[in-house]
Amino acid sequence: MSSIRVMSYNIQGHAAMRREDHLPKLAEVIAAAAPDVVGLQEVHCRTRVGPVHQGEVLASLTGMNLWFGRSCAMDGGDYGNAVLTRGTIVDAVVHPLPGSGEPRSVLQTDIDLDGASFTFFVTHLAAWGRLLRVARMRQIATLGDVTARAKLPHVLVGDFNVPPAAEEIRALLAHGHLRVIGDAKEATFPMTRQRLDYVFCDAPWTCVRAEVIRRGPSDHWAVVVDLELG
């Protein structure tokens, strides 16, 4: 493996309750981008949204391998983050994140892809702007510690629910081992025209290309990044 294509996608899983074609259209966006690994947020597993595991459906439609990371129980099922990859997931752990409001977590996976190994993290931080800023800052502190312990080259993706100039992003970068990839001016949340979704990586990686995919059924646009391992 000389390079990987990474995607971060908040899939707005609850929208599948009112749109039967929501998951197939998400799969079309993912398949068209041809990523090697995808971090998904807002994934429902047999909640009131529907009787299906959304991660399993997307894995089947895209032909990728799946690992689901439960953040909390919801409406008789589970809710959280997930990883899709064309590689092999050899290990995975869910780290709970601190803070009030909806329970949050970061899913850590070790992936083998074309003979190379790396660690891939996906998360979704607290929403509600200033109201839960203290919670997000605590979550950022935990994220910084968890990612710093990774022994392999690593990538962190997710919906951070804050714009690039926010204190939360500065605090994560201040840990010193991660850098943000892509153009901060490109919105990923059309409703507010802000960037809320990010890809971070550590030193061994070089960014070749970064893109926001401005289409799809979710209220977020996906972020796609091509990385080379130096």
Image: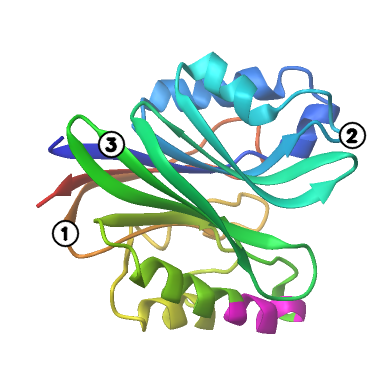
Q: Report the magenta stretch's main SS.
A: helix
Query: Mark 1 belongs to which amino acid?
Result: Pro
- Quarter of the picture holding the N terminus: top left
Image: magenta residue range: 131-138
Query: Mark 2 belongs to which amino acid?
Result: Arg
Residue 208 image offset from top left, x and y in percent: 19, 46
Residue 46 image offset from top left, x and y in percent: 80, 31
Vertical position of residue 48 compared to residue 93: above or below = above
Label 1 – label 3 distance at C-alpha: 16 Å
Secondary element at image label 3:
strand
Query: Mark 3 belongs to which amino acid?
Result: Asp
The residue to which callout 3 is attached is 112
What residue sits 26% from the left and 33% below the top?
113
What residue sits 63% from the left and 17% below the top?
24
Front label number (1 vs 3)? 3
Q: Is residue 35 left or right of residue 52?
A: left
| Residue 204: assigned label | 1
| Residue placed furthest toward the front | 91
Front label number (2 vs 3)? 3
